[in-house]
Amino acid sequence: IFFKRASTLQTSRCSLAVALQHTRGRCSKVTSTSDDVDQVRTLLQLCVDRYYISPGPTNTELFERGLSCSYGPLGMELRRNLLEQWWHCVTKSRAQVFGINTLSSSKDREARGRRQLRIVESEHLKQILEQQELNKEQLIQQIQTLLQSSPPVRTSLLQGALEQYVPSLELVNRKLPYGLAESGLCFQSSDGSAEVTQTSLVWFCSPRTSSQWLDHWNRQRLKWWRKFALSPSDFSSMDIPEQERVEEASRGVRIIYNFPWGQEPLETLWSRGDAELMQTHKGARSKLQCRDGRKSVPHIVSVTGNMDRGLMAFLFNSLQQLKREDRRQKLQHRKVLKLHPVLAPVKVALDIGRGATLELRQVCEDLLQELMEAKISVWPGYRETMSTSMEQLNAKYDEMGVLFTVVISENTLESGLLQVRSRDTTIKETMHISEIKNFLSRYISAADNI
Amino acid sequence: IFFKRASTLQTSRCSLAVALQHTRGRCSKVTSTSDDVDQVRTLLQLCVDRYYISPGPTNTELFERGLSCSYGPLGMELRRNLLEQWWHCVTKSRAQVFGINTLSSSKDREARGRRQLRIVESEHLKQILEQQELNKEQLIQQIQTLLQSSPPVRTSLLQGALEQYVPSLELVNRKLPYGLAESGLCFQSSDGSAEVTQTSLVWFCSPRTSSQWLDHWNRQRLKWWRKFALSPSDFSSMDIPEQERVEEASRGVRIIYNFPWGQEPLETLWSRGDAELMQTHKGARSKLQCRDGRKSVPHIVSVTGNMDRGLMAFLFNSLQQLKREDRRQKLQHRKVLKLHPVLAPVKVALDIGRGATLELRQVCEDLLQELMEAKISVWPGYRETMSTSMEQLNAKYDEMGVLFTVVISENTLESGLLQVRSRDTTIKETMHISEIKNFLSRYISAADNI
């Protein structure tokens, strides 16, 4: 079995000898295992240096394990863009998908699973422990009462969607198929607790079509992941072997990414039957039935993604390391984060060249405002007073994945012309300041529609 | 003191005699307390009926208390729009604001406050309780160890931003002022736990300007709330009395909304000094200093919002109840949710009139796709097969707050003309099908730019 479960990641990362299933396509080829270790180290360092994730070994470890970590400004924006694209893709599909927002903890919800987590008032628990006069039995009794009143936290978004099935049925006039979509934090129990940004589509369909729908969503989701990839073949999907199946499910598929240390799941699709829906609504069959000729209780196809690991996958996928000689024939290592234009957290950086600083800054401020109002994310590089060469700046912006760098100089004050450098081609073009906003908007939306 | 604290809401709602501070402006006037009770009941029922919040008394109670509840598709979309607007407003401000995303629970974070909450593996705790061979002391010992390893959950976003101060300092080249913005779930301990969608801007500025910045952000935020209001005077701001101040703070302001049962805070601003920042970074003054001439440790202005209560405020604010006679001179009660065009969860509903159903549906599907691709949220009313009169449909859409209703009929197939009804004017216009997308886009962005 090639597939590495999340729980075995710690070991699999140590044994980087795992054969890579695919070549890295357009990306710089990774051929040996020591290259893999280097690549991982390089990317993690870059993520910290370039404000994707917050520094610190604990935080980097969370990130590597595909869990939520503390994200810096660029990571936060990338996460936003990713969730926005997921949302747009799932709800834009020709079928009916509605968004919901359920609670992450709820007293009313039954806790499930062996490793359930509850939010406990720890001071209350401490007070119980400090009561000298209690005997052991009374102590246990009191703690059990506290535990009962402590709400369990969700480990997945499925339960919330199952609960919303009945109220949403009216919305679709009892007609199948339809889906409920949600994204949000879920908690996992693993050495203390850990959180994950989950996306979930719970699809209700007639029993005889559930297998086709599983295939449909598998194709849709894989297409989505690949759309934003620099090297699409690193994303693939595979059936889940019978022995790994969850109890209720008849079939499952995983969308996986080929990390340097092995494959890891990004999204899991299950065709799960109706058992969980029946259980959630205590078998009230008549409440659950819908109008599809046979008055059947729908079957469920669940599509559950881990967007924290998805974010990491796109970072690994887009890192290109290039070697080239500079003017003085010195070997330069250029690192570029070629994130898809739609995902790139910063679309354009504004900088100033030589000239009257005060006036140039004013031009930058005005342009910044104009771009921000058009919802194009800008990096205000001109505000830094450090003297950095344009070459160093470009290297920094490439590592940040900034799509374009605009330089405003003396010349701009005279003629309105500025210089625009592309991350992907490194070509510098001259453009009029009045054109830049439309140029960027068109560029991004063109990339979106390919 | 007019101001009602969240904790006293239960009582204040019972004593609806609280004098209203402002008239409801353009909204239907509320004059007596029994009207207030009616208004609350009407709005809550409407929120459940029209897919803003999920049904059930527990859920409605959470909603009323200004806590996160389970939102239906429309509530979820309204929450999205609200958070999007908040984000856009806070980061678009001329000053430097960066987004971050911190963990909601973390073992590394010190738990604060008297009523701290921790995520506990409840099965582990149960196992400890079941160990017969332990004596009372051993039992206490084991539970304390478990408690220590259980991560505390955040009660506000402040702590995360304080931790991110040092890594973000490099980003701004050690120059003040700048801010860190975040939105996310926070947990409160209150009769079991409860969650709140918080927004947070933590603003780092030089000590001598902190008071001015407090005023600046107060003005900005109040302007923002009022921008989306039907009756802006229901939103106001007031200084927090000295006796209610938190320990570290020198001054505080609250932005409040005038609910039928009294005033409640939507957003709280504090000028908090540097004590908490020093404490978070264990007094490492040199790490905290920035370049503002005096090498000072910055003071903090915190701007913390409750977007769940904010969402409820906009719903109350936008509900207009009108009485008018219909054709048969029967008194009609018309309820319209006049949400701001930018916030309205559904911008347009598509329905079909008389004609060849199959062809009309196809036209609707195509138009739906076109609008969704332009990111205009559409309600696919034409998919319902129930025969409802156009009058009933309009009443339903008005309660949902749908901006426009488009009716496609036989006529559309022939001439391309369709009928567009406005929620706010109830006027029906004829428009060509090719114009509708641009009309809607222009209408929404015009409302955004007022």
Image (cartoon, coloured by chain):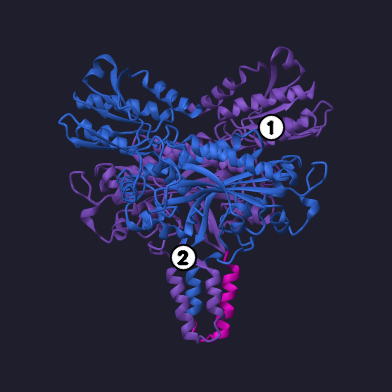
Chain colours: A blue, B purple
Relative image position of residue B321 (x, y in whole percent): 69, 36
Residue at 28% across, 61% down: B282
Residue at 65% across, 41% down: B30
**Tag 1 subunit:** B
Q: Which residue is mark 2?
A: B116
Is any part of residue A408 visible from this angle?
yes
Say which element carries label 1: loop
Q: Which residue is mark 1?
A: B380
- Give the Cα separation between the discs numbered 2 and 1: 46 Å
Whether A141 is among the magenta residues is yes
Q: Who is closer to the viewer here, A206 or A385?
A: A206
Is any part of residue B218 visible from this angle?
no
Residue at 18% across, 47% down: B294
Image height of B94 relative to B354, above or below: below
Which residues, given as a range, are shown in magenta? A131-151
Q: Is residue B184 left or right of residue A209?
A: left
